[in-house]
């Protein structure tokens, strides 16, 4: 009797874990087929850096797997920042005052602002990364704040508060890219004030990246 009860308990846990993986994946796949406009372009086809240099296709993308090859992540490459963190809210996704670590690649249990990109309110692009799926590894602190990032729509608000200042960004579009495509790190133009949110898609996989671009409301 005890073994039967234990078996049912383990089966229930297994089904729960499986559903946590399958449901977000299916929801994303349905969204990509029915709602995502693959013709959207948020950056120039041949992007250039703010210094005018052409971005080469051999530059690795922003991902944990590539941190040893991405200059901004190399240990010892200190980037001076005026504050250590700021808060991000996305009302459409039910996110409120989520901590964003400045100049960090640590987004296991929070969000991270890509080292070297602009800070809130500045001209350029504030680039923020977060997980899209939970980890079932014992002791894992991973938080999937961007699990529903694909549900955001053009016109939705992204709110930021940094050192007492509040900024409102309005979503202008989204794009799915290869992990090696770093053109999305750059702002679409040199004059605008932008914010980008990035996560892996489909949820639970890291084969592609979903980028949401928003512009500071003047």
Image (spheres, rainbow, N blue to C red):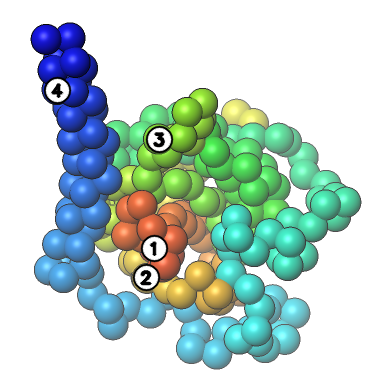
The mark found on residue 136 in the picture is: 3
Q: Position of residue 32 (x, y in %)?
A: 21, 67
Under tag 2, what secondary structure?
Answer: strand
Residue holding disc 4: 8
Residue at 18%, 35% (x, y): give it: 15
Label 3 or label 4, whichever comes before in sequence order: 4
Label 2 or label 1, whichever comes before in sequence order: 2
Label 4 or label 1, whichever comes before in sequence order: 4
Under tag 4, what secondary structure?
Answer: helix
66 relative to 166 in the view: left or right: right
Q: Give the image quarter of residue 17.
A: top left
Q: Nearer the viewer, mark 2 or mark 3?
A: 3
Res 211 seen here: no
Under tag 1, what secondary structure?
Answer: strand
Label 2 or label 3, whichever comes before in sequence order: 3
The mark found on residue 210 in the picture is: 1
Mark-to-mark CA distance, 4 and 2: 43 Å
Label 3 or label 1, whichever comes before in sequence order: 3
In the rendered view, tell whether residue 189 sits above or below residue 156: below
Mark-to-mark CA distance, 3 and 1: 23 Å
Mark-to-mark CA distance, 4 and 1: 38 Å
CB under 8 Å between discs 2 and 1: yes
Q: Position of residue 187 (x, y in %)?
A: 55, 70
Residue at 70%, 47% (x, y): give it: 103
Residue holding disc 2: 175
Mark 2 Cα shell of 10 Å, populated few (<14), some (14-19), many (≥20): some
């Amino acid at each position: 009797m005890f073994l039967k009860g234990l078996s049912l308990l383990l089966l229930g846990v297994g089904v729960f874990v499986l559903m946590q993986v399958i449901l977000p994946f299916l929801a994303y796949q349905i969204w990509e087929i029915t709602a995502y406009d693959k013709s959207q372009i948020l950056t120039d086809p041949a992007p250039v850096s703010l210094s005018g240099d052409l971005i080469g296709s051999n530059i690795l993308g922003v991902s944990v797997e590539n941190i040893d090859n991405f200059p901004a992540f190399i240990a010892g490459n200190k980037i001076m920042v005026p504050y250590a963190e700021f808060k991000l809210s996305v009302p459409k996704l039910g996110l409120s005052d989520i901590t964003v670590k400045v100049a960090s690649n640590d987004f296991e249990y929070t969000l991270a602002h890509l080292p070297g990109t602009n800070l809130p309110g500045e001209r350029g692009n504030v680039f923020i990364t977060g997980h899209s799926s939970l980890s079932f590894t014992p002791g894992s602190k991973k938080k999937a704040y961007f699990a529903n990032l694909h549900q955001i729509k053009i016109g939705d608000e992204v709110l930021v508060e940094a050192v007492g200042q509040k900024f409102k960004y309005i979503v202008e579009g989204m794009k799915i890219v290869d992990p090696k495509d770093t053109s999305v790190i750059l702002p679409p133009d040199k004059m605008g004030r932008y914010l980008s949110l990035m996560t892996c898609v489909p949820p639970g996989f890291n084969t592609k990246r979903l980028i949401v671009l928003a512009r500071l409301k003047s």
